[in-house]
Image (tube, rainbow, N blue to C red):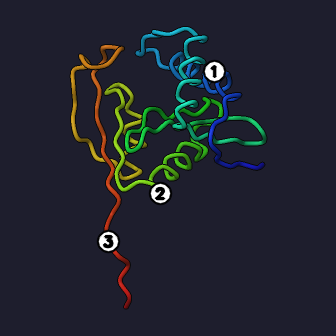
Amino acid sequence: MSQFLRPARSTDAGKLGVILSEAVAAQSWKPCLHTGAEDIAHMGDLIDRGWVSVCERDETAVGFLARDRDLVQSLYVLNAYQNQGIGALLLEQAQSSQERLELWTFQANEGAQRFYRAHGFAEAERTDGAGNDEGLPDVRFVWVKSNKEPQNG
C-alpha cells in the first residue's frame, strides 16, 4: 500500500467534490446546501487557488486539506479511509509549513473537535452559527507552533 501527499491538480476536482459531498451526507445534523456539481465546482476553485493538498493511496485520492495561508478551509477523508491516519498526515503537513493555523468546525462535530485537540489545537471561540452558511453553532480552533528549543543535556 503506497500513500503520499501531493498538490491537487485540476483533474482532481471531481474526486474531491465526491469526498466533500460524501462527508456532508454522512452527518445527519448537517444540512445539504449544495449539489454534487456545486461541490465539484467549489473544489475546482480551491484547486485553482493553489490551496489544496491531496492524500493519495494506491492511486486513489482518499482525502484532502484546503488551506489559505494560516486558515484551514476544509479537511475531509473518504468515510472508508477514516481513522487510518490520513487526516493526521494532511494536518501535520500543514502544521510543518506554518507557525499558526486556525479553523472552524461545528459544535455538533465532536469527533472533529477531539481530532483537532489531539493535534494541539485549542478552542478560541464559540458562536451561535449566525456567521456560517449552515446556520449551525460552530467552534474556532487555533494552533500555534511551539517555540521551545530542545535542551542539550
Position of 23 with respect to 103 (left or right) is right
Res 37 quadrant in image: top right
Q: Secondary structure at mark 3?
A: loop
Which label was assigned to residue 145? none
- For label 2, the crowd category at 10 Å Cα-Cα, with few meaning under 14, some 14 to 19 and many 20 or more, is few
- The residue sitting at the bottom extreme is 153
Mark 1 vs mark 2: in front: 2
Marker disc for residue 96: 2
* Residue 91 vs residue 119, the one in the foreground: 91
Amino acid residing under circle 3 = Lys
Indicate which disc, 3 or 2, sits on the residue closer to the N terminus.
Answer: 2
Q: Position of residue 53 (x, y in %)?
A: 58, 41
Q: Quadrant of residue 142?
A: top left
Tell me the crowding category of disc 1: few under 14, some 14 to 19, or many 20 or more residues within 10 angstroms, Cα based: some
Q: CA distance from mark 1 to mark 2?
A: 27 Å
Give SS at disc 1.
helix
Viewport quadrant of the C terminus:
bottom left
Q: Residue at the spot x=50%, y=19% of the render?
A: 24
CA–CA distance in space, label 1 to label 3: 41 Å
9 and 58: which is toward the camera: 9
**Residue sitting at 50 percent across and 10 percent down?**
34
Callout 1–callout 2 Cβ contact below 8 Å: no
Q: Could you tell which of marks 1 and 3 lies nearer the N-terminus? A: 1
Name the disc covering residue 18, or none: 1
Q: Which residue is mark 3?
A: 148
Per the image, label 2 sits on a secondary structure element best described as helix
